[in-house]
Amino acid sequence: QPKPNPKNISNEKRIQELEQELAKLQTERQTWETLLRPPSSGSLALSPLTSMPDPNTISSEMLDDQSQVSALSSLLQPHHKPQDPSSSDPPNANTDLQLSTLTRLQNITSSNNLEFTIDTFASNIHTLTSYHQAADRVAGEVLGISAEALEEREREGRRRDPAGGGGEADEVGVRDVLRGLSRII
């Protein structure tokens, strides 16, 4: 019986490995697709914010801070204050405030406006940061070129007048440096 070619054997092993990897990638793809699909209305429903949670269902043992425990106990105690007839607040003012706050919260959370606003804000921050970094790089390059030009002008001035004296020549040198800087900038 002829012996199989070793290359064929290694190719068969490689095929099996690739098939296993392909199966793994397909299951991973299915998992990602299920995660990307919007949830059905029955599977994940956010509770509406129309009513306050019942404070009686909250255990004080679950709270970390003493101030939270005291706030919970104040919620659990019934408030029976006699209404002051001279009070300017109507008895419904607190309820109206709660309803308007709840309505605003529902408007914010029910629509995609908040998510869009946050995404836009993050994008603008990134753009601003990128612009700032680019401006810093350009400013650094311009300053470097300017410094090189100034040094070159100073070297040329020293070569022309090694004694360093020459009043008029110094003024011309300064003018040349300023003229050169204005061309660069």
Image (cartoon, rainbow, N blue to C red):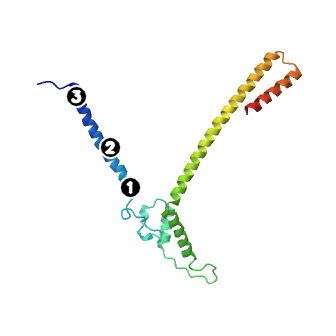
Q: Earlier in the sequence, mark 2 or mark 1?
A: 2
Q: Amino acid at mark 3?
A: Asn
Question: Could you tell me which residue is drawn at 52 percent across and 63 percent down?
Answer: 108
Q: Are marks 2 and 1 in contact (CB under 8 Å)?
A: no
Q: Nearer the viewer, residue 58 or 53?
A: 53
Q: Residue furthest left?
A: 1
> How far from the left and from the top, in percent, is residue 132?
63, 42
Residue designated by label 3: 8
- Relative to 25, say whether 163 is above or below: above
Q: In what element is the residue under mark 1?
A: loop
Question: Image height check: is 151 above or below 77?
Answer: above
Res 24 → quadrant: top left
| 134 lies above or below 155 | below
> Is disc 3 surrounded by few (<14), some (14 to 19) or many (20+) residues within 10 Å?
few
Residue behind mark 1: 37
Is the Cβ of the residue at disc 2 closer than 8 Å to that at disc 3? Answer: no
- Check contact, mark 3 vs mark 1: CB within 8 A: no
Amino acid identity at mark 1: Arg
Give the CA distance from mark 2 to mark 1.
18 Å
- Mark 2: amino acid: Leu
| Whole-number angstrom distance, CA of label 2 to CA of label 3 | 25 Å
In the rendering, which numbered label is found on residue 176? none
Is residue 74 toward the left or the right of residue 133 in the image?
left
Residue at 74% over, 24% down = 151
Specify few, some or many for label 2: CA neighbours under 10 Å numbering under 14, 14-19, or 20 or more.
few
Q: Check disc 2 and report the residue beneath it.
A: 25
Numbered disc total: 3
